[in-house]
Image (cartoon, rainbow, N blue to C red):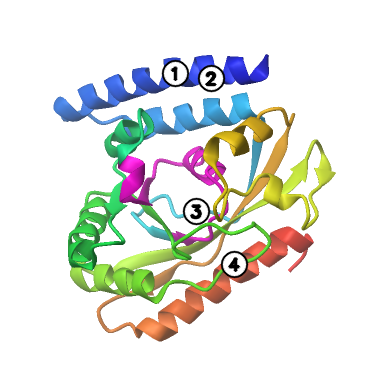
Amino acid sequence: MRPYFVAFFFFTLTPLLIGTQWLLDKLHLPGWGVIAVRYYRILCWMLGIRIRVVGEPVRDHAVLFVSNHCSWADILAIGSVAPIAFVSKIEVGKWPLVGAAARLQKTVFVDRARRSQTGDSIAEMVNRLASGISVVLFAEGTSSDGNRVLPFRSALIGAVREAAARAEGGVLIQPMSICYTLINGIPMGRQHRPLVAWYGDTDFMPHIKAFLPRAAIDVVISYGEPIAADAATNRKVLARQVEEAVRGLLNTSVLGRP
């Protein structure tokens, strides 16, 4: 019965979220972030996703979080911690319900097939940060099996540097990692982590159908030390620094020690 329960609440809550956030946006009222966090927390509760936070995310300043990425569940877990906007591929904006909800939750869409529009995406990221909204960038450019951090895309790191150059006073970057550690209270080994990870050519519907019967999934979201970036920041040095920081955070979560 659990899949039906989740489906019922998803198709009930999501239109309500869309309607409420649309109204707030039209009336120029605050509150979208609080509503989004509660929405994600309810979905995590329904799916049995339990979150543990290690470190402290920057809360008094809009920050660009740079993270690894391994599952659609990352969005729910990260979004349940604090109000945040995501950088996503443009195809997500066309998904029924999900696309509309993502747009109202300040998502920045990137069209990877049209590099000429990269500047527009960067401008949107800068606008979000300038308006006090923190943004998450999955710098690998795709999702992994959850056991490792893939090399960061140089183009995406270049976008970070460009955003820092355009933003007045630069950009504060905070490395972040997400790692799925337990399933039904039992430690997840390398062979089990792909049960949660959604990557490669895996179809979404079969994956979520296999995910739903699992009683409880524990996830660790780790935050590293913030890094200041501006127009003078070296792109290659920044890429290496952030990638190493995220990899270190993930390895600590996987191994249970630094």
Up-down: is 224 above or below 74?
below
Assess whether mark 1 and mark 2 are in contact (beta carbons under 8 angstroms).
yes
Q: CA distance from mark 4 to mark 2?
A: 32 Å
Assess whether mark 3 and mark 2 are in contact (beta carbons under 8 angstroms).
no
Look at the image and give the residue range highlighted in magenta: 66-93
User: Which image quarter holds the N terminus?
Assistant: top right
Please report whichever mark, 1 or 3, sits nearer to the chain's N-terminal start: 1
Task: Classify residue 111 by image quadrant.
Answer: bottom left
**Dot 4 amino acid type:** Val
State the residue at coordinates (76%, 44%). Answer: 182
Q: Secondary structure at mark 3?
A: loop
**Dot 2 amino acid type:** Ala
Please report whichever mark, 4 or 2, sits nearer to the chain's N-terminal start: 2
Q: Secondary structure at mark 4?
A: loop
Up-down: is 145 above or below 235?
above
Q: CA distance from mark 2 to mark 1?
A: 6 Å
Within 10 angstroms of label 1, few (less than 14), some, or many (20 or more) residues? few
State the residue at coordinates (19%, 65%). Answer: 119
- Left or right: where does residue 108 sit relative to residue 120? right
Please report whichever mark, 2 or 3, sits nearer to the chain's N-terminal start: 2
Tag 4 residue: 149
Assess whether mark 4 and mark 1 are in contact (beta carbons under 8 angstroms).
no
Return the x and y of residue 161 as percentages of the image width and height: 30, 74
Return the x and y of residue 142 as percentages of the image width and height: 48, 59
Tag 2 residue: 7
Assess whether mark 3 and mark 1 are in contact (beta carbons under 8 angstroms).
no
- Left or right: where does residue 162 sit relative to residue 151? left
Q: Secondary structure at mark 2?
A: helix
Q: CA distance from mark 1 to mark 4?
A: 33 Å
Tag 1 residue: 11
Please report whichever mark, 1 or 4, sits nearer to the chain's N-terminal start: 1
